[in-house]
Image: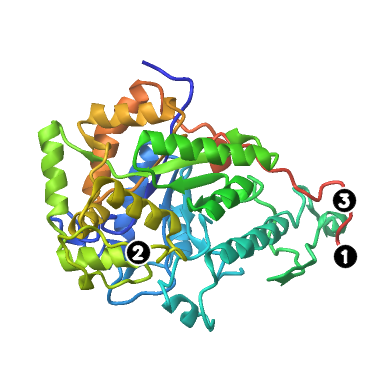
Amino acid sequence: MTSQRKLRLGAFFSGTGSNMASWRHPQAVPDGPINLQYYRELTRKAEEAKLDFVFFGDGLFISEKSHPIFLNRFEPLTLLAALAMDTTHIGVAATLSTTYTMGEPVGTSLLRRWKGQPSNYSKPEHPAHDLRYEMAHEFLEITKGLWDSWEDDAFVFDKEAGVFFDPEKMHRVNHQGEFYSVQGPLNISRSPQGRPVLIQAGSSEAGRSFAARHADVIFTGQPSLEAAKAFYDDVKGRAAEYGRNPGELLILPGCSPIVGHSEAEADEKYREIAGLVEMADALNYLGRYFDDLDFTQFDLDAPFPELGDFGRNGWESTTDRLKKMAREENLTLREVALRTTTSRHKFIGTPEQVADTMQSWLEGGAADGFMVNNSVLPVGFNDFIDLVVPILKDREIFRTEYESNTLHGNLGLPIPPNRYVGTKTRN
């Protein structure tokens, strides 16, 4: 059973794992978020398996309610520099906030992580959801221009003639916009892959349009093949409307595989992970999606409360999905909180079952690949790499060797042309 299309796989290394109580797991490494050797070993294992990239998230504010892995962790760009020296082919990626960074997935920053974010950056309040995407659009247009500051052959290094660079091949952006003012040029030559791969996470209306316009890769969370296919078709269609080739935007839904040698073993692993979470922590975790709403004011075993548009200035697509799920399945607050911390999904089962689900999403037009975000690290990732990836390779839907020496190339994406080639825009 083969397919001409190949899965693209990224790994989200979130300290001890995505589950908020992952640090309590018997096989977890509690200091994982600040353990360089631990991240080196995970990244090496990902590269040995020929994954496309590894990703590290960031945050701009913490509180006593934060996910434990956020409380004590490396600054991601510094971490990437260390890991890049230790690898040869695998891509390394991290979050940069376009709202609070003017300096990549590209992020706009979420809710009021929440109210503390603007207070950490001398801002009176967090910009509204859609405004943040307007800022992000301008931010990226500038950044793309800066990445093109130098044409590929601008640096001559002619010792005899005394010519270090060709001034005609240096370009300034000279941008004066609504949110930013930047002259340029950038003080580094153009990357061999043109520019970094732009990865964006966000599934709201504004997020979809932004991704369709700018992103090379988009992360999304979708609860079913049907929902993922609808999202896939929508975003690819928007990309075409912007004049882009839809095949040059890769959509990677997140998945948290829990793998056992039998269905019973996989189920036991799931129940073990779910049982690590205290209800008070689950309510806090749920509350972060809803602008830090205190859910303890509601009856745990009553239907999930009617919240209207509350919480739509941050995790808009997530809060809409949670409210829809609660309404359609008549879930209680307790049930929603537990599902939010440890969801029951289609990527739990034997290695063959997990591989079947991935293949069905790929061939069903619901995904170009997946962002693997294990509930518990390193054990969950090791299970996926050791048990599932060999099946994907045997089915010829995942590579056995890297195809390129750039992330663009390994993702099957073309190198973006320099916008200034053949122009005179130095001054």
Instruction: Give the structural element (helix, strand or loop) at label 1.
Output: loop
Question: At which x and y percent is residue 211?
Answer: 57, 49
- Quarter of the image with the C terminus in it: bottom right
Tag of residue 427:
1
Question: At which x and y percent is residue 156?
Answer: 80, 52
Tag of residue 423:
3
Q: Residue at x 10, y 42 (%)?
A: 268
Question: Is 290 rendered above or below residue 239?
Answer: below
**Alpha-carbon distance for marks 2 and 3?**
54 Å
> Identity of the amino acid at label 3?
Thr
Tag of residue 307:
2
Nearer the observer: mark 2 or 1; the answer is 2
Q: Are marks 2 and 3 in contact (CB under 8 Å)?
A: no
Residue 250 seen in render? yes
Which tag, 2 or 3, sits closer to the chain's start?
A: 2
Left or right of 299, for residue 5: right
Question: At which x and y percent is residue 62?
Answer: 36, 74
> Identity of the amino acid at label 2?
Leu
- Give the class, few, some or many, for how many residues have Cα within 10 Å of label 2's Cα (few <14, many ≥20): few
- Between 168 and 271, the residue placed more toward the observer is 271
Question: Is 5 rendered above or below residue 141?
Answer: above
> Identity of the amino acid at label 1?
Asn
Question: Is 86 rendered above or below residue 396?
Answer: below
- Between 122 and 289, the residue placed more toward the observer is 289
Q: Residue at x 25, y 59 (%)?
A: 304
**Alpha-carbon distance for marks 1 and 3?**
12 Å
Image quadrant in which you'd find residue 389:
top left
- Between 60 and 363, the residue placed more toward the observer is 363
Which tag, 2 or 1, sits closer to the chain's start?
A: 2
Residue 50 seen in render? no
Q: Residue at x 23, y 49 (%)?
A: 330
- Give the class, few, some or many, for how many residues have Cα within 10 Å of label 1's Cα (few <14, many ≥20): few
